[in-house]
Image (tube, grey):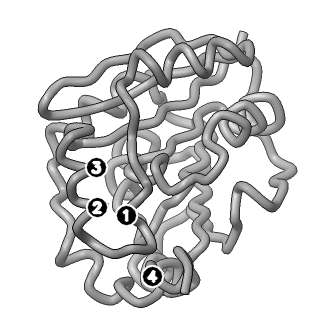
Amino acid sequence: MGQVEFFDSIAKEWDTIIEVNEEKINILLSKINIKDNTSILDVGTGTGVLIPFLKKINPNGGIKGIDISQGMLDIANEKFKNIDNVTFELVDIETSTINESYDKIILYSMFPHLKDKTSTIKFLVEKNLKENGKLIIAHSNSRFFLNNMHKEKDERVSKDILIPVIEQKLLFEEVGLNVVDAFENDEIYYLVISKS
């Protein structure tokens, strides 16, 4: 059993398992200056945790949530079926191509689960991010907390870890990405990449 089966198996409990810290999420989203009428790709949307936050600051813009877990997306579709301009699609960003481009791309609480992190982000920026757009990798927990949680959670995600943010920044810069912000402390972890 792989990642897909793991996330499908916990989908129904997901919203009760996770901690949604509004203050931290709003701080992270503020790093990419979302305005109304913005097109947003929410990569690894899960059950749509970010959707209420994104709709609040972007009520008229289009939001597309993608995930590898149909179980997660079924719950997201049900939760947000009456919300305009929000769509969900079953996509593995590492093996599939999305043809649209977006003003903002968000990877919230999912980056460690990518197998080929650098290449996937480079492809997203080049193929799916509009000129002057921003991509954020964001976590509302520390690297230490997340790495320990994944190690203890399940063997299918035990090796899904974050590396020090400065090291991750250097890896992105080595492949030509423009990292405009990178930060971590014992509360959050994020990197912002700009396309310009």
Residue located at (26% from left, 23% from top): 184
Residue beneath disc 4: 6
Q: Tell me if label 2 and label 1 are in contact, CB under 8 Å.
A: yes
Name the residue tied to disc 1.
158
Quick one: label 3, few (<14), some, or many (20+) residues within 10 Å? some
Q: Earlier in the sequence, mark 3 or mark 4?
A: 4
* Amino acid type, callout 3: Asn
Q: Secondary structure at mark 4?
A: helix
Q: CA distance from mark 3 to mark 1?
A: 8 Å
Q: Quadrant of residue 64?
A: bottom right
Viewer-side label of 2, 4: 2
Gap in angstroms between the C-alphas marked 2 and 1:
4 Å
Looking at the image, tell me whether mark 2 or mark 4 is earlier in sequence order.
4
Q: Is residue 176 left or right of residue 3?
A: right
Q: Which mark is residue 147?
A: 3
Dot placed on the residue nearer the N-terminal end, 3 or 1: 3
The foreground one among 132 and 90 is 90
Residue count near mark 1 (Cα–Cα under 10 Å), binned few <14, some 14–19, many ≥20 = some
**Residue 185 in the figure: left or right of residue 91:** left
Labelled pair 2, 4 in contact (Cβ < 8 Å): no
**CB contact under 8 Å: marks 2 and 3:** yes
Q: How far separated are the C-alphas under marks 2 and 4?
A: 14 Å
Q: Is residue 142 above or below residue 33?
A: below
Say what amino acid the circle numbered 2 marks: Lys
Q: Position of residue 148 (x, y in %)?
A: 21, 53
- Return the mark for residue 151: 2
Q: Quadrant of the N terminus?
A: bottom right
Assign a secondary structure to mark 1: loop
Amino acid type of disc 4? Answer: Phe
